[in-house]
Amino acid sequence: MLDIVKRFFSKTTADATQDANRNTEHDVRIAACALFLEMARIDETFTETEMDTILSIMKEKYGLPQEHADALIAEADKELAESVDLWQFAKRINDNYSTDEKIEVIETLWRMVYIDGKMDEHEHYLMNKLKNLLRLSHNQLIDAKLKVLHSD
């Protein structure tokens, strides 16, 4: 009888841990997506190409089917609209991503910046702000930018 109780509680704890991990993973995806949306909109021109790029990133990087990617973008958009600033999104990323994973986020943001072939002052400002929020160095920011610019 005691073994049954122990197995029940260990299973429940394991299930709760697994659910928490799924929720954290989902929250981090929303946070990253929110940053991508913010970057796409910062120049006050949100193009279909930018939206297609975000969808493609969500599907490829996170292995999501179209409907899940759409739902994730919708949720990120909702949270972004309700937020006061970007700190909450950066915090989720900082709490759950390694430095290399944060650099991948920055590289993706650089791709968003250069979709139209140029960087405007708002995009420049936001990249520097996000570098600070994600606790990355100026060299890491520039290296990510050069990697993106030289990969095309």
Image (tube, rainbow, N blue to C red):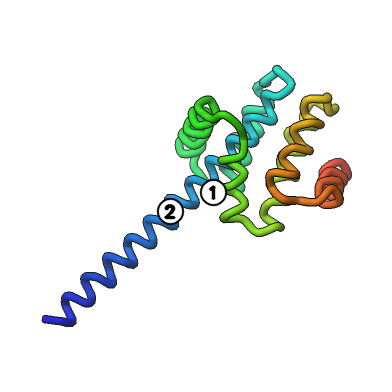
Rendered view: 44 above or below 114 = above
Q: Measuring from the top left, give residue 56's x and y in whole percent.
A: 62, 38
Rendered view: 31 above or below 12 = above
Mark 2 element type: helix
Mark 1 element type: loop
Q: Nearer the viewer, residue 63 or 104?
A: 104
Q: Residue at x 53, y 25 (%)?
A: 81
Give the CA distance from mark 2 to mark 1. Answer: 14 Å
Residue identifier under label 1: 63
Q: Measuring from the top left, give residue 27's x and y in whole percent.
A: 49, 45
- Which of marks 1 and 2 precedes in the sequence? 2
Which residue of the protein is positioned furthest toward the left in this rendering? 1
Q: Measuring from the top left, give residue 120's x and y in whole percent.
A: 83, 24
Q: In which quadrant is the N terminus drawn?
A: bottom left
Q: Measuring from the top left, give residue 40's x and y in whole percent.
A: 68, 28
Q: Residue 12, located in which quarter of the rendered image?
A: bottom left
The answer to whether residue 26 is left or right of residue 7 is right
Q: Which mark is residue 89?
A: none
Evaluate if marks 2 and 1 touch, with contact meaning CB atoms under 8 Å apart.
no
Label 1 neighbour load within 10 Å: few <14, some 14-19, many 20+:
few
Q: Residue at x 78, y 38 (%)?
A: 128
Label 2 neighbour load within 10 Å: few <14, some 14-19, many 20+:
few
Q: Which mark is residue 22?
A: 2
Q: In which quadrant is the C terminus drawn?
A: top right
